[in-house]
Each structure stands twice: as structure tokens, then as C-alpha cells.
Image: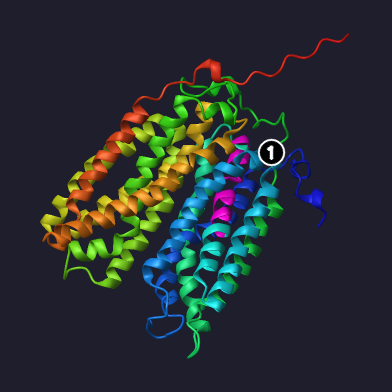
Amino acid sequence: MSPSFLDRESTIAPPGYNRFLFPPAALAVHLCIGQAYAFSTFNLPLTKLLGITQSTPSDWKLTDVGWTFSIAIVLLGLSAAVFGSWVERVGPRKSMFAAALCFGGGFIVSAVGIHFHQIWLLYLGYGVLGGCGLGIGYISPVSTLIKWFPDRPGMATGMAIMGFGGGGLIAAPLSILLMEHFKSPKSTGVLETFVTMGVIYFMFMMIGVLAARVPAADWKPAGWIESAHRKRMVTNANVTVDMAWRAPQFWLLWGVLCMNVTAGIGVLGQASPMIQEIFSGKVTPSAAAGFVGLLSLFNMGGRFIWASASDYIGRRYTYMVFFLLGIVLYSLVPWFGHLGSVPLFVAAFTVILSMYGGGFATIPAYLRDMFGTMNVGAIHGRLLTAWSVAGVLGPVLVNYIRQFQIDHGVPKAQAYSITMYIMCALLLVGFLCNFAMSPVNEKFHYRAPSPVPAT
């Protein structure tokens, strides 16, 4: 494989290329990096590496292992922000290849850390290196998808980002299956599983690398007239990544994404114990696991359905629905718990998680509407720092407020009520940010340099 094979120029699609061949390439990458949602399957086995069947005083503590996922999510946002311009410049093939190396290599480095029982290598491998793979892999196809589907940007990004939401549904059973296969009296099977998954994910992501194509500069969908599809909140202009950073619309969208993700990710991480504690004696651990799986399905499906719907009703109105309906549902959750109605409780959170996933898939198209297509991938990368903040803020709010209330005598079944009302407040902030959105001022628009007159 020559270096030129990875260059952007080598990926320009020939005339007649079917644009629907690119979304599966993006999906191949997102299904792999979506494994992050299933990392918790390794938490308990990683605390028994020495004791095998139970933890020993020398084993890693669960709280220490838990930092691995947090580091990975923080690095996801930071790497997307730092490497966003590079991804835009080199194109999807080279950036997807870099993501495959980082994500697959992160598993291998972590396996070395497991072998030598050095937790800093676990942090470095899955947390730092794998987190960079998450960030670069997440944004790699976004700009290209929007260029291939200027007529349906929401649907296009929804198809790929749906894979990130569904990656955990594949990774969780795969992880358990591999650990059971490799388990022995001397091993929990985690080390061998990490090596195997590192290789599998690298190879599968390479399918996306090989299939990556970008449209020619003058390409347009057959019969599509750009001006006929413009709406008030969809710009004809372009904004560079450095100018977008200065525009108030960027920070309003940062707040929109951060509030939407914070409200969903905290619940997603605590879903199983939450439903068991609120409905103590009525929901078994296996039923709670089914609840988590159902949330994952709605998280995944919402990414495609809501993002596709946004092509028709507009991005701003889509987020209006997210925030207003979210406020109503979160405010009703404590009442559903008080009624003891498991079906109503489950229904509320399935809709909430569909909007959580829909928020991720709709935001790239929202950015395209506001800032144009020229640097949308790099701008999206910087915006994902909101995910890094929400990835810490959401679980902290849910877990620490719950523990504070329990420590002060509140029954576990009622320990989530205040948290639900706090989520309503966060969604209200997000609603106000979205309500304040307006077209980007012309002073931020990109203007091509004037040609130098011939002498």
C-alpha cells in the first residue's frame, strides 16, 4: 500500500459513483468505535485480574478502572477539536486509517498494561490512544457525508452516527463471549479479549478506509438545485473553523449539545441500578439489563429517525422538540415512580434516549446549516468538546446527588427525584440557547482572496 493510496486525491470518486456506497464505509468505523458504550462490561473483570474469581487487596479498585472510560470520552472531544482541521484537509481515508491505528492500538497497549498490571498503561491505551481513535473516527466521515448528501444532510449523518449508538449492542455480547472463551483458572480472559478485539476492530475499520470516497469539487446530486432548497436558517456562505470559533452561534450550539448530552448520558450510565432502586422488588437485574438494551436501541434508532426528520422540519425546530418534550418527560418521571408504573417509566426514558441519540446525529447538519460545508468537519470537532464536558457532568450529577440524598436519609426509590428536576433545568438552558439561534453575521463569512492582477 503506497502512501498516496491514503491521500485525498486518491479517493475522488469517478463519474457515476453511487453516493450511497459511502454511508456503509462511515458506518463500519462508527460501529467499531461505538464499543465505548459497552466498556462497562470490562469493569468488574478488570478488578479481578489477580484474584481471578474475586478481588484481592492488590487488584485495581472499581473507581480506578472507571476513570478509563472518562479519560476516553474527554480525549474524544479534545482530539476531535485538535485534529478537526487536519481531518478536513487530508480527507476521510487517511483520517479513518489513523483512527483505526489509534483505536485498535489502544486495545493492544491496554493488554500490555493488563499483563504487567500497570493501570497507567490501561489509561494510556484505551483512555488516551483509544480516545484519540474515538474522536478522529467520529468526525472523519461527517464532512464527506454532508458533501455527498447536500439535499439530505440530516439523514446522511444519521446513518453513520447511528452506528456509534449501536456499537455497544454488538460489543457487549462479543466482549462477554470472548472473555468466557478465554477464561481459565489463571486468567479472567480480559487480556486475550483486548488483543482479539483490537485486531478485529482494526480490520473492520479498514473496510471503511478502503471504501472511502469523496465527491469531485463540482459534483451535485442529479436534478438538485442548491438555491431551491435553501431556507432562512440555512446559509449559502461558508465560515472557516477559526472564524466559527468566534461567532456566538458556535457557543450557542455548544450549549445546545452540552445540555442535551448531559441530560441523557447520566441516565444512560446509571440506568440499571436506577430502575431497580426506584421499583425495588418489582424489577429484577435481568429485567434491568433488558431495560438498558432497550435504551440502547432507542439511542441508536433515534439517531437516524430524528436526524432524518430534521431535514423536513428544520434543525432548530427539532431541538425545540428535544428540549420541550424532554422537560415534560423528566418532570413526569418521579410521578411515574411514585405510581409504581414500570411501563410509563420505561416509555418516558426510551423517548428521552431517542432524543439523546438524535441530538448527536442532528448537530452536524445544524452546523452545516449555520456555517456552510467548507470546514464543517473541523467545526464539528471543536464542538465535541461539549461532549467531553457532558461526559463528566452528567454522571457526576446523577451519581453524587443520589449518594448525597441517600446519606441524608432519603429512600433509594426517591433519591433520583431531585436529579430529574435538575435535568429539566439543564434542558431549559439548552432550549434558551437554541431559541436564541439566528443566521451567522456576514462579517464571519469566508471571502476568497481577490486575484492578483497581471502585470
Toward the viewer: 79 or 323? 79
User: Disc count in the image?
Assistant: 1
In the drawing, does residue 113 fall left or right of residue 318? right
Residue 342 position in % (x across, y down):
19, 60
Q: Is residue 39 visible?
A: yes
Residue 96 position in % (x across, y down):
65, 51
Q: Residue at x 53, y 42 (%)?
A: 157
Decide whether residue 138 is among the magenta residues.
yes
Residue 75 position in % (x across, y down):
51, 52
State the quadrant of the N terminus: bottom right
In the drawing, does residue 453 fall left or right of residue 279? right
Where 231 sits versus 47, above or below?
above
Which residue bears the numbered disc 1? 89
The residue segment tinted magenta is: 130-147
Residue 83 position in % (x across, y down):
61, 44
Crowding at dot 1, Cα within 10 Å, few <14 / some 14-19 / many 20+, comes out as some
- The three-letter amino acid code for the residue at tag 1 is Arg
Where 298 sits versus 196, above or below?
above
Where 31 sits versus 318, above or below?
below
State the quadrant of the C terminus: top right
Q: Is residue 305 visible?
A: no
Dividing the picture into quadrants, the one containing residue 286 is bottom left
- Magenta stretch: dominant SS? helix
Decide whether residue 315 is among the magenta residues.
no
Where 351 sits versus 169, above or below?
above
Q: Residue at x 45, y 68 (%)?
A: 172
Q: Residue at x 37, y 30 (%)?
A: 434
Residue that extends furthest to the bottom in the rendered view of this protein: 185
Dividing the picture into quadrants, the one containing residue 412 is bottom left
In the drawing, does residue 80 fall left or right of residue 327? right
